[in-house]
């Protein structure tokens, strides 16, 4: 890690966060098998980490108060984005929800240009095109664009826009650190997940016996996988252009496709491999192009 620049470490942190969300379906499916499904599973994945960080919330209350409305707004938008994304799958096809959410590199780049005056470089445009092409290849989308057609589509599209807003707010925030951002993320995620249950509906109440029986494996997953992934994202995102963060999050699609192929009967062949390569190139372009340019400059100055 010593040889990596600070910016590239931030990129690795965000790519790691995408990797974590790529395996997020595994504990969700296990919870569903235990009788905790739908919107209630999303509540569980926020509420349990919130209970774990409550002591930290109480210990650092001064820093959290010092963060003011901006910190709470970041927590609200960041938490709401994943709540919307998770629940979009309840109302539309998985493919459509993911495609519409992962337009967020486009929204992130546009919002950063408008509000932060950050340039949209040709490399970023190329990376976005590679990422979108990789998604289309993996999902095998038919003719026509996946325009929103139902409530789930709109929820999926909204989740990407909301996350792009959260990224812009984090990029423009110099006061709050990753500990405060992670804490308010779980706080507002829990509140918005519960609000979704109340306002939209959640299906049958969860099986509490199944929930309690899941804790021996769920707690280690949350402590050792989910929470470090969230912390990595909250550390890396403020240091990067929101469009770049959206691209790096596309590792979720690659990891999700690969793990689903290994652990389930879902197909994995040349199409999926080609899509993963395109998505990986989308994330690597922002790292490799500046690196090659720097190497070329060093050679010319010798």
Image (cartoon, helix red, strand yellow):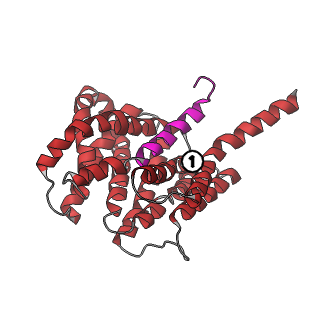
- Residue 244 point in image, percent of width and height: 57, 47
Quarter placement of the N terminus: top right
Question: Which residue lies at the image location 63% right of the left edge and 25% below the top edge?
Answer: 3
Decide: few, some or many residues near mark 1? Use Cα within 10 Å; few <14, some 14-19, many ≥20.
Answer: many
- Residue 249 point in image, percent of width and height: 50, 48
Queried whether the magenta region covers residue 80, the answer comes back as no
Q: Which residues are magenta?
A: 1-22
Vertical side of 179 occupied by 140: above or below? below
Q: Describe the element under mark 1 as helix, strand or loop.
A: helix
Residue on which disc 1 sits:
244
Task: From the viewer's perspective, tell me whether residue 154 is left or right of residue 11.
Answer: left
Instruction: Name which quarter of the figure residue 97 lies in.
Output: bottom left
The residue at the far front in this view is: 265
Instruction: Name which quarter of the figure residue 39 lies in.
Output: bottom left
The residue at the far left in this view is: 209
The residue at the far top in this view is: 2
- Residue 2 point in image, percent of width and height: 60, 22
**Magenta segment, prevailing SS (helix, strand or loop):** helix
Residue 172 visible somewhere in the drawing: no
Vertical side of 116 occupied by 96: above or below? below
- Residue 154 point in image, percent of width and height: 39, 68
Task: From the viewer's perspective, tell me whether residue 135 is left or right of residue 259.
Answer: right
Task: From the viewer's perspective, tell me whether residue 220 is left or right of residue 168.
Answer: left
Residue 283 visible somewhere in the drawing: yes
Queried whether the magenta region covers residue 6, the answer comes back as yes
């Amino acid at each position: 890690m010593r040889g990596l620049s600070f910016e590239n470490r931030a990129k690795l942190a965000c790519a790691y966060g995408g990797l974590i969300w790529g395996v997020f379906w595994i504990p969700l499916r296990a919870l569903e098998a235990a009788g905790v499904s739908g919107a209630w599973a999303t509540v569980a994945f926020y509420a349990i980490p919130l209970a774990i960080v409550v002591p930290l919330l109480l210990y650092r209350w001064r820093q959290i108060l010092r963060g003011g409305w901006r910190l709470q707004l970041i927590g609200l938008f960041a938490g709401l984005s994943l709540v919307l994304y998770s629940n979009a799958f309840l109302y539309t096809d998985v493919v459509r929800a993911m495609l519409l959410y992962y337009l967020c590199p486009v929204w992130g780049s546009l919002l950063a240009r408008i509000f932060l005056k950050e340039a949209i470089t040709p490399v970023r445009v190329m990376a976005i095109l590679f990422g979108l092409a990789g998604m289309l290849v993996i999902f095998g989308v038919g003719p026509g664009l996946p325009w929103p057609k139902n409530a789930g589509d709109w929820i999926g599209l909204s989740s990407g826009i909301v996350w792009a807003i959260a990224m812009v707010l984090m990029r423009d925030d110099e006061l709050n650190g990753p500990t405060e951002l992670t804490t308010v993320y779980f706080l507002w995620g829990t509140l918005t997940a519960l609000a979704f249950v109340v306002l939209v509906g959640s299906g049958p109440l969860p099986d509490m016996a199944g929930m309690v029986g899941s804790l021996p494996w769920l707690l280690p997953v949350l402590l050792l996988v989910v929470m470090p992934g969230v912390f990595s994202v909250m550390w890396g995102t403020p240091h990067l252009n929101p469009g770049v963060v959206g691209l790096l999050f596309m590792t979720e699609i690659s990891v999700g496709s690969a793990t689903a192929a290994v652990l389930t009967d879902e197909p994995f062949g040349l199409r999926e491999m080609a899509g993963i390569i395109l998505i990986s190139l989308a994330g690597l372009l922002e790292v490799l192009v500046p690196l090659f340019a720097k190497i070329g400059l060093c050679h010319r100055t010798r």
